[in-house]
Amino acid sequence: MTTFADLGVDQDIVEALSARGIQDAFPIQEQTIPLGLPGQDIIGQAKTGTGKTFGFGIPVVQRLGLDPEPGVKALIVVPTRELAVQVFEDMDMLTSNRSTSVVAIYGGKAYEGQIDQLKAGAQIVVGTPGRLIDLAGQRLLDLSNATEVVLDEADKMLDLGFLPDIEKIFQKLPAVRHTQLFSATMPGPIIALARRFMTDPIHIRATDPDEGLTQANIRHLVYRAHSLDKDEVIARILQARGREKTVIFTRTKRAAQKLVDELGDRGFNAAAVHGDMSQEARERSMAAFKAGKRDVLIATDVAARGIDVDDVSHVINHTIPDDDKTYLHRAGRTGRAGRTGVAVTFVDWEDLHKWALINRALEFGQPEPTETYSSSPHLYTDLDIPEGTKGRIATAPKTTPVRTAPPSAADAAEEGASTGGTRRRRRRRTGSERVGSTFEEESAASGSESGSAPASADEPAEGAGTHDGQGKEHHDGKPAAARRRRRRRPTGGSAPAGS
């Protein structure tokens, strides 16, 4: 293995890499760094996850010097916000032993903080095309002295329609500059772009001739699954032996959020990244996933280029991607930095034609996906899932009875019938009755006030309900009191109606 010191990298950068446990260079880095350091324009092509960021980042940092003057001297253009954050972190690490300052410029964040960093004299700018053009149009970003220019993931910029924006950015750059273009795939329009804006570039393709179009350290499994059974299958895959962090890709934002809610209900620790989330929420999800607080990340293709996490063991395509390039970038989230990984793809019945195109383009040799259900035996053997695994690791929380205050005497008397006691009839209180008193208590109190002796054992107690349906007795055994009706006294017509 070739070390970075062997490639002519400055000692302070070598120490910064060693502090992160990075000592040996990958093939793309071995080929591009010696050419990039003296200022050769480069077109670098390598599979995702093979170290392209350091392949262009180390020459940029070293060419700027130990103490560059304030102002933008290097520009790195990336297609997505997530990739901007990832490249910014790598460049910030490379410059940790230097006075060079790095700033990330991308949408979804407030302008003020980014503008303040530019005014403070940041020398390296990592940004997305839209925000770069916006700040340059406001004359807040001066690119006239940016002699180091990098286009990262250029094919994704083509897919997103950013090529016109790239041309606008190049018009603001100096004519004499060092330009590097890196990508996993190299379509024709990207080659044409390179010929227009680069000077005698050297095309470096760091691949192993015996490896094929996909990475040899990634095992690809393709299943034809029913849409109603996918969640159950995924939940069982997430319990496979040796599974570490997992990325699940969906086609739509709605499907991503629905799957997050479903897996959360099943007891899994999942987070989401999709276009309906705010930039702050997306960054929080990515940070939690990288830190290990969440071990499942569900994302749309917006985040496919910005997930640079070494310990992703599984990638699951909830829905099949539209083409082979998207498939490569999705699957490339696992098996990074020389590790092994597993890529599982679900193909719906109506998407078999898409799989036929991907299978032909990537030379998988599997024209018919295996029909698979959550109970299929081969699912357990293919992914090393323990026997008897179900798709739920946590049950729904049990409802606990709500504690209330003890019942009052009136409530207890009223509910006596249901507990075997004598039901007490409730009546309205008068001003002299206390709150919560029962009919029997009030009768006893009135009897003691009048001096009457309590009833004997063979006589029914007052209020015991002796009414036999005959006569005019009230329910307390006494004759009902005659009601007196008040009449209005006729006056000379001046008395009010309510007197």
Image: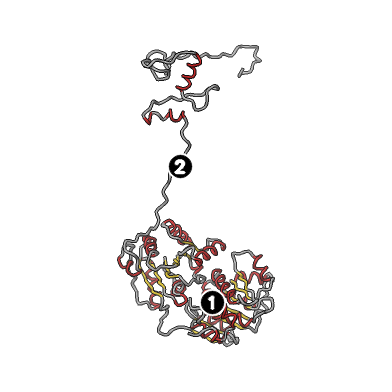
Residue 280, horizontal then vertical, whole percent? 57, 62
Q: Secondary structure at mark 2?
A: loop
- Residue 451 located left or right of residue 88: left
Q: What's the mark number on residue 154?
A: 1
Q: Residues within 10 Å of mark 2 (few under 14, many from 20)?
A: few
Report if residue 429 is visible in the image.
Answer: yes
Q: What's the mark number on residue 461?
A: none
Residue 392: name its quadrant: bottom left
Q: Nearer the viewer, residue 7 or 281?
A: 7
- Tag count in the figure? 2
Looking at the image, residue 324 lies above or below residue 262: below
Question: Three-letter amino acid code at disc 2?
Answer: Val
Residue occupying image coordinates x 61% and y 69% = 131
Q: Secondary structure at mark 1?
A: helix
Which image quarter holds the C terminus? top right
- Residue 340 located left or right of residue 191: left
Q: Which residue is mark 2?
A: 402
Residue 269, horizontal then vertical, whole percent? 45, 60
Residue 400, horizontal then vertical, whole percent? 43, 45
Mark pair 1, 2: CA separation: 60 Å
Query: Which of marks 2 and 1 precedes in the sequence?
Result: 1
- Residue 402 located left or right of residue 77: left
Name the residue at the left extreme.
377
Residue occupying image coordinates x 38% and y 78% = 363
Q: Residues within 10 Å of mark 1 (few under 14, many from 20)?
A: many
Question: Three-letter amino acid code at disc 1?
Answer: Ala
Mark 1 vs mark 2: give the one in front: 2
Residue 230: name its quadrant: bottom left
Report if residue 197 is visible in the image.
Answer: no
Residue occupying image coordinates x 69% and y 76% = 70
